[in-house]
Image (tube, rainbow, N blue to C red):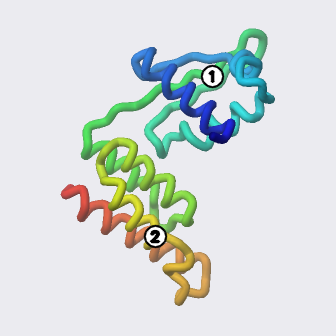
Amino acid sequence: MLLSEKIARIIEGMLADNGGCLELQRNKLADEMGCVPSQINYVITSRFSTDRGYIVESRRGGGGFIKITKVSFDKGSFLMHLLGAVGSSIDEQSARALLFALFENTLISEREFKIISALMTDKALCDIQEKQGKDKVRADMLKSLVLTITNV
Protein backbone atom coordinates (compact mmCIF):
# COMPACT_ATOMS: atom_id res chain seq x y z
CA MET A 1 0.00 0.00 0.00
CA LEU A 2 1.28 3.46 -0.89
CA LEU A 3 2.15 5.90 1.88
CA SER A 4 -0.45 8.38 0.59
CA GLU A 5 -3.11 5.66 0.82
CA LYS A 6 -2.08 4.86 4.41
CA ILE A 7 -2.25 8.54 5.36
CA ALA A 8 -5.69 8.91 3.73
CA ARG A 9 -7.03 5.86 5.57
CA ILE A 10 -5.71 7.13 8.90
CA ILE A 11 -7.34 10.52 8.34
CA GLU A 12 -10.62 8.86 7.25
CA GLY A 13 -10.54 6.73 10.40
CA MET A 14 -9.90 9.75 12.56
CA LEU A 15 -12.79 11.57 10.87
CA ALA A 16 -15.11 8.61 11.50
CA ASP A 17 -14.03 8.42 15.15
CA ASN A 18 -14.68 12.15 15.60
CA GLY A 19 -18.10 12.43 13.99
CA GLY A 20 -16.90 13.82 10.66
CA CYS A 21 -14.88 16.75 12.03
CA LEU A 22 -11.17 16.61 12.77
CA GLU A 23 -8.41 18.99 13.76
CA LEU A 24 -4.91 17.70 13.22
CA GLN A 25 -1.40 19.06 13.32
CA ARG A 26 0.34 18.36 10.04
CA ASN A 27 3.82 18.13 11.55
CA LYS A 28 2.69 15.76 14.30
CA LEU A 29 0.98 13.41 11.83
CA ALA A 30 4.02 13.55 9.54
CA ASP A 31 6.26 12.53 12.45
CA GLU A 32 3.94 9.64 13.31
CA MET A 33 3.87 8.48 9.68
CA GLY A 34 7.61 8.96 9.13
CA CYS A 35 7.18 11.33 6.22
CA VAL A 36 7.58 15.00 5.39
CA PRO A 37 4.71 17.44 6.12
CA SER A 38 4.27 18.14 2.41
CA GLN A 39 3.14 14.51 1.98
CA ILE A 40 0.31 15.20 4.42
CA ASN A 41 -0.58 18.33 2.43
CA TYR A 42 -0.65 16.31 -0.79
CA VAL A 43 -3.05 13.75 0.67
CA ILE A 44 -5.33 16.40 2.12
CA THR A 45 -5.52 18.45 -1.09
CA SER A 46 -5.95 15.42 -3.35
CA ARG A 47 -8.32 13.28 -1.24
CA PHE A 48 -10.20 15.69 1.00
CA SER A 49 -11.31 18.39 -1.44
CA THR A 50 -14.62 20.22 -1.73
CA ASP A 51 -15.49 18.09 -4.76
CA ARG A 52 -15.28 15.04 -2.53
CA GLY A 53 -17.51 16.53 0.14
CA TYR A 54 -14.99 18.01 2.59
CA ILE A 55 -14.22 21.47 3.90
CA VAL A 56 -10.58 22.01 4.79
CA GLU A 57 -9.39 24.95 6.87
CA SER A 58 -5.78 25.67 7.67
CA ARG A 59 -4.35 27.76 10.49
CA ARG A 60 -0.68 28.61 10.41
CA GLY A 61 1.73 29.68 13.12
CA GLY A 62 2.73 28.15 16.43
CA GLY A 63 0.48 25.22 17.12
CA GLY A 64 -1.25 25.62 13.76
CA PHE A 65 -3.64 22.94 12.62
CA ILE A 66 -5.69 21.69 9.73
CA LYS A 67 -9.41 21.25 10.25
CA ILE A 68 -11.22 18.77 8.01
CA THR A 69 -15.01 18.52 8.05
CA LYS A 70 -17.05 15.96 6.14
CA VAL A 71 -20.02 17.82 4.74
CA SER A 72 -23.29 15.96 4.57
CA PHE A 73 -25.91 17.12 2.10
CA ASP A 74 -29.17 15.66 1.08
CA LYS A 75 -28.93 13.90 -2.29
CA GLY A 76 -30.38 16.75 -4.35
CA SER A 77 -28.25 19.48 -2.76
CA PHE A 78 -25.10 17.41 -3.06
CA LEU A 79 -25.74 16.71 -6.75
CA MET A 80 -26.54 20.32 -7.53
CA HIS A 81 -23.38 21.44 -5.75
CA LEU A 82 -21.22 19.00 -7.69
CA LEU A 83 -22.87 19.67 -11.03
CA GLY A 84 -22.51 23.40 -10.41
CA ALA A 85 -18.79 22.81 -10.01
CA VAL A 86 -18.67 21.32 -13.51
CA GLY A 87 -19.66 24.55 -15.21
CA SER A 88 -19.50 24.69 -19.00
CA SER A 89 -16.31 22.63 -19.26
CA ILE A 90 -14.31 20.15 -17.20
CA ASP A 91 -11.00 18.36 -17.68
CA GLU A 92 -10.59 14.59 -17.43
CA GLN A 93 -8.99 14.59 -13.97
CA SER A 94 -11.64 16.87 -12.45
CA ALA A 95 -14.44 14.80 -13.99
CA ARG A 96 -12.98 11.66 -12.44
CA ALA A 97 -12.71 13.38 -9.03
CA LEU A 98 -16.35 14.45 -9.23
CA LEU A 99 -17.44 10.94 -10.18
CA PHE A 100 -15.44 9.53 -7.30
CA ALA A 101 -17.26 11.88 -4.93
CA LEU A 102 -20.57 10.57 -6.25
CA PHE A 103 -19.38 7.00 -5.75
CA GLU A 104 -18.06 7.69 -2.23
CA ASN A 105 -21.42 9.17 -1.30
CA THR A 106 -23.24 6.14 -2.76
CA LEU A 107 -25.04 8.18 -5.41
CA ILE A 108 -23.62 5.99 -8.18
CA SER A 109 -22.46 2.38 -8.12
CA GLU A 110 -18.89 1.23 -8.71
CA ARG A 111 -19.95 -0.07 -12.12
CA GLU A 112 -21.50 3.29 -13.06
CA PHE A 113 -18.35 5.05 -11.82
CA LYS A 114 -16.17 2.89 -14.07
CA ILE A 115 -18.40 3.22 -17.14
CA ILE A 116 -18.80 6.98 -16.90
CA SER A 117 -15.09 7.42 -16.11
CA ALA A 118 -14.25 5.54 -19.30
CA LEU A 119 -16.49 7.87 -21.29
CA MET A 120 -14.82 10.95 -19.78
CA THR A 121 -11.29 10.13 -21.01
CA ASP A 122 -9.51 12.13 -23.68
CA LYS A 123 -9.11 8.85 -25.55
CA ALA A 124 -12.88 8.37 -25.69
CA LEU A 125 -13.22 11.92 -27.05
CA CYS A 126 -10.42 11.41 -29.59
CA ASP A 127 -12.34 12.78 -32.59
CA ILE A 128 -12.46 16.21 -30.98
CA GLN A 129 -9.14 17.92 -31.67
CA GLU A 130 -9.22 21.01 -29.43
CA LYS A 131 -8.87 20.66 -25.67
CA GLN A 132 -11.60 23.25 -25.05
CA GLY A 133 -13.95 21.24 -27.26
CA LYS A 134 -13.23 18.03 -25.36
CA ASP A 135 -13.74 19.76 -22.01
CA LYS A 136 -17.08 21.23 -23.13
CA VAL A 137 -18.41 17.95 -24.53
CA ARG A 138 -17.17 16.15 -21.41
CA ALA A 139 -19.05 18.60 -19.15
CA ASP A 140 -22.27 18.26 -21.14
CA MET A 141 -22.05 14.45 -21.15
CA LEU A 142 -21.18 14.28 -17.47
CA LYS A 143 -24.14 16.43 -16.43
CA SER A 144 -26.55 14.48 -18.58
CA LEU A 145 -25.30 11.05 -17.45
CA VAL A 146 -25.25 11.92 -13.76
CA LEU A 147 -28.71 13.46 -13.81
CA THR A 148 -30.09 10.44 -15.69
CA ILE A 149 -28.47 7.82 -13.43
CA THR A 150 -29.32 9.53 -10.15
CA ASN A 151 -32.94 10.27 -11.18
CA VAL A 152 -32.85 13.93 -10.24
Could you say where residue 103 lies in the image, as x and y percent from the top left? 37, 49
The spot of residue 137 in percent (x, y) is 45, 76
In the rendered structure, the answer to whether residue 83 lies left or right of residue 55 reads left
Q: Write the residue at 31% across / 53% down.
A: 108
Q: Quadrant of residue 131?
A: bottom right
- x and y, in percent, of residue 65 in the image: 66, 17
Report the residue marked by disc 2: 118
Instruction: Spot the residue most to the left.
Output: 151
Q: What residue type is labelled 1?
A: Ile
Q: Which residue lies furthest to the front in this view?
A: 1
Q: Residue at x 78, y 28 (%)?
A: 35
Amino acid found under the numbered disc labelled 2: Ala
Name the front one of labels 2 and 1.
2
Residue in front for this viewpoint, 94 or 112: 112
Q: In this view, does 35 lie above or below 103?
A: above
Q: Tell which of 120 and 90 is nearer to you.
A: 120
The answer to whether the residue labelled 2 contacts the one labelled 1, judged by CB atoms less than 8 Å apart, is no
Q: Looking at the image, which residue sits at the far bottom?
A: 127
Say which residue appears at 65% left-offset and 25% top-offset: 58
- Which image quadrant for residue 150? bottom left
From the image, which quarter does the N terminus lie in?
A: top right
Residues at marks 2 and 1, CA–CA distance in whole angstroms: 34 Å
Where's residue 34, x and y in %? 77, 24
- N-terminal of the pair, mark 2 or mark 1, is 1
Q: Quadrant of the C terminus?
A: bottom left
**Where residue 66 is drawn, which disc sits there?**
1
Q: What element carries label 2?
A: helix
